[in-house]
Image: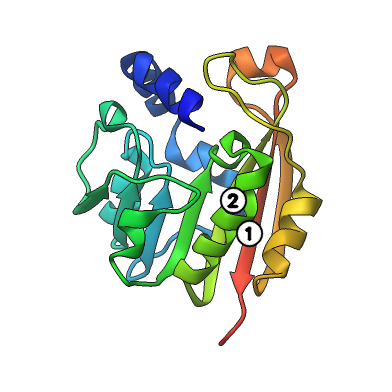
Amino acid sequence: MSKSLSGYRAQAAQLAAQYDKIPVATLYQGFGPFCPKAGETVLDIGAGTCRDAAHWQSLGAKVVAVEPVRELWQHDVDEQLLDHLPNLPATRTLNRQFDVIIINAVWHHLPLDDRQTAASQVATLLAPQGRLLLALRHGPTPIDRPGYPVTADIESARFAGLGLTAIHQDHAGSIQPNNQSLGVTWTRLVLQHSTI
């Protein structure tokens, strides 16, 4: 994942402007009614510009934004951490669980060997009955921000082994013109933690 992080750092200003052009409502429409609500605790892993995290906070959620590329940060959130998957060492020191965890456009950057570790860490951070919102990218990725193949079935099964059940799935084409021309598609999964 280190090569991807270097690619994001090198183009941070350009990418931040590109990401923030997409309205939050458009970006999250595939998650249906499962988006964060007022009063819920939210962990946004790979928060990018922190625009989305700031949006959920403005609606009354209590948000921790986690992003390993400081150069991408454009918006203030009450709690922001420099941290990254698969191990999330800084996040784990908070010793907290969250009602909602968001991992949007991040998972495909994880090498296959890192995904089980990452999933285990995420599962421990999710509160009983909490929801994981996971956006999976399918298709080619930029050379300087490499990605690896990902399938909804495999990731659903991975999280099922950790006590998370898939309760929603949406598959759609990319909303960005460049990605559309490359045939990029997205699966948006919502997985719920069983009561412990």
Q: Considering only order in the chain, which callout, 1 or 2, is on the residue closer to the N terminus?
A: 2
Circle 1 Cα neighbour tier, 10 Å, few/some/many (<14 / 14–19 / ≥20): many
Residue situated in front as seen by the camera: 60 or 105: 105
Residue situated in front as seen by the camera: 120 or 130: 120
Identify the image quadrant of residue 71.
top left
Q: From the viewer's perspective, is 92 left or right of 161?
A: left
Mark 2 residue type: Leu
With respect to residue 62, does 111 lie above or below?
Answer: above
Circle 2 Cα neighbour tier, 10 Å, few/some/many (<14 / 14–19 / ≥20): many
With respect to residue 195, does 151 lie above or below?
Answer: above
> Mark 1 = which residue?
190
SS for callout 1? strand
Q: Residue at x 52, y 37 (%)?
A: 26
Mark 1 residue type: Val
- Whether residues under marks 2 and 1 lie with C-beta atoms below 8 angstroms apart, the answer is yes
The circle on residue 134 is: 2
